[in-house]
Amino acid sequence: MKSLIYVSKADKKFTHEEVLQLTNKSAEGNEASNITGFLCFMDGHFLQYIEGESVAIGTLFAKIEIDNRHSVISSLYNDEDHKAKFSSWKMKYLDSEFFHTLDVESFLSSQLQLMKEQGLYHKKWKDMIWQGVNILANKANQV
Ligand SMILES: Cc1cc2nc3c(=O)[nH]c(=O)nc-3n(C[C@H](O)[C@H](O)[C@H](O)COP(=O)(O)O)c2cc1C
């Protein structure tokens, strides 16, 4: 299984309820294609992590990229084969309530900044982002 993480800028205002609806609809779509992951929405930007078979990821991300509700700023594809890190999350909305229980908000928001501002040319930045995903996966498995 492969994974992909991206940051996008929302092209309209989203309420908490709308992001929740988007996530629930996404979870339904992901069920059939065996995709799992999480979605955060902060400061008008989405950060989404998806994992699944490479073809399924490619198909989904092609749809996500042309979705006119947002514009993708940067994305990272992890080509290494790995097991699902978030197998029980068809698509989990990590909202502020979730962050309060895990205390990872500042950490994810710094990832968002990094992906938004750095060109991601340096391996160091890329490694930091995947390391971050693993930290979250460890926390997710504790709850
Ligand atoms: C921020 C964002 C994240 C999305 N994530 C997913 C997702 O994880 N799974 C999914 O099926 N659709 C997701 N979508 C919706 C897709 O862009 C697309 O509208 C949806 O897959 C419908 O595809 P269809 O035309 O094949 O039914 C997302 C859209 C946005 C704006």
Image (cartoon, helix red, strand yellow):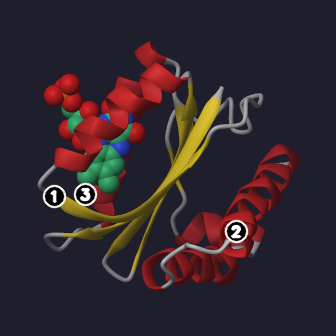
Residue type, label 2? Lys
Q: Looking at the image, is mark 3 or mark 1 nearer the viewer?
A: 1
Describe the element under mark 2 as helix, strand or loop.
helix
Viewer-nearest of discs 2 and 1: 2
Disc 2 to disc 3, C-alpha distance: 35 Å
x then y, percent, for residue 97: 58, 68
In this rendering, position of residue 122 left or right of residue 112: right
Question: Which is nearer the eye, 31 or 96?
Answer: 31
- Residue 42: give x, y in percent of width and height: 42, 76
State the residue at coordinates (62%, 73%): 108
If the picture is divided into quarters, which one holds ligand 1?
A: top left
Does the closest atom of ligand 1 sit within 8 Å of the Cβ of label 1? yes
Label 3 SS: helix
Answer yes or no: disc 2 within 8 Å of ligand 1.
no
The image position of residue 40, as x and y in percent, is 48, 63
Labels 3 and 1: the sequence-earlier one: 3
Which residue is depicted at the point 42% across and 14% down? 32
- Residue placed under numbered mark 2 in the picture: 123
- Front-most of residues 131 and 95: 131
Residue 68 picture location, percent across and down: 11, 54
Label 3 sits on residue: 18
* Up-down relation of residue 55 to residue 98 (above or below): above
Tell me if residue 103 comes above or below residue 134 in the rendering. Answer: below
- Going by the numbered disc 3, the residue's amino acid type is Glu
Q: Of tags 2 and 3, which is closer to the observer?
A: 2
Q: Is residue 24 visible?
A: no
| Of the image marks 2 and 1, the number of the one nearer the N terminus | 1
Cα–Cα span, label 2 and label 1 = 30 Å
Q: Residue at x 74, y 38 (%)?
A: 85
**Dot 1 corresponds to which residue?**
69
Q: Dot 2 surroundings within 10 Å: few (below 14), some, or many (20 or more)?
A: few
